[in-house]
Image (cartoon, helix red, strand yellow):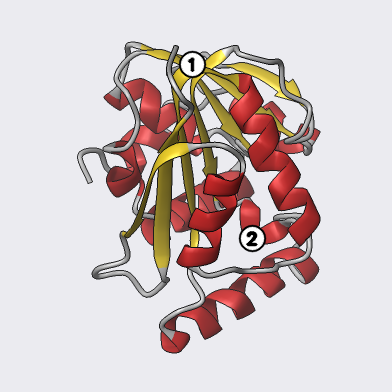
Amino acid sequence: MALGAGRVIRQYRSPGLRAQAYMRIRWAVCPFDRVLRFVPDRGALLDVGCGSGLWLTYLALEKPGLALHGIDTDPRKLEVAATSLAAKAQLRQASAVDLPEATFDCITILDVMCLLPDATKAEVIRACHAALRAGGTLVVKDADTRPWWKYAPTAIEEALAVHVMRITHGRPRFQSLEELARLVGAAGFQQVEAARIDRGYLHPHVVVCARRAGP
């Protein structure tokens, strides 16, 4: 990556040992730099399910031309995100379907879709389509169900994070890269690009990037 975990985490004012440990693990297992290339350099960006704001902080350091926004349903994580000196994001406690229309140039969703019920996934993607300005970009990063030897430990880890450690909330329901791409296309997005970004990683990371039709 262009930036190490330490430099990103040092942007926070006393996040606490638990939050720091989680962010270091998250940084180690997620290819943020490979998602970065799908994000525009300028405009208003919303991160859905922003959590402690690690991705937003990384974006602030790598793409300072972005105006950053984040929503999450967990007020404790938003409190940590608010301590990021670099991100300076506008944060709001809200669900992924509670979005203003035609407001953002880019929306990112990182490892959130797998925690949502199938019916809610479609609703979230439609809400993102409505929240983007014409020509806006949607970037969805998640985990594929293949290959099985990467998927199996990923599913177990997510179940532990939800049901045992209670780091995240929801009920893990993974879907294949092809299913995710079809879901995005069905919401009206165009130029749907689906790609694997898991080379060298133990988790089956994938990304779907698409655009809302221009004027």
Looking at the image, residue 192 lies above or below residue 163: above
Q: Residues within 10 Å of mark 2 (few under 14, many from 20)?
A: many
Q: Secondary structure at mark 1?
A: strand
Mark number, residue 134: 1
Residue located at (71% from left, 55% from top): 168
Relative to 193, is 125 on the left or the right? right
Q: Earlier in the sequence, mark 2 or mark 1?
A: 2
Toward which corner of the image does residue 48 lie, by quadrant? top right
Task: Name the residue rendered at 50%, 48% in the picture.
Answer: 23
| Residue 14 in sight | no
Residue type, numbered disc 1: Ala
Asked if residue 131 is positioned above or below residue 121 in the image, the reply reads: above
Quadrant location, the C terminus: top left
Mark 2–mark 1 Cα distance, whole angstroms, equals 27 Å
Tag 2 residue: 114
| Lateral position of residue 86 relative to residue 47, left or right | left
Q: Which residue occupies the foreground of this view, 123 or 166?
A: 123
**Amino acid carrying mark 2 in the image:** Cys
Q: Position of residue 46 (x, y in %)?
A: 55, 24
Q: Is residue 147 above or below residue 204?
A: below
Which residue corresponds to the image point at 55% horizontal and 64% vertical from the top-left? Answer: 179
User: Which quadrant would residue 41 be assigned to in this image?
Assistant: top left
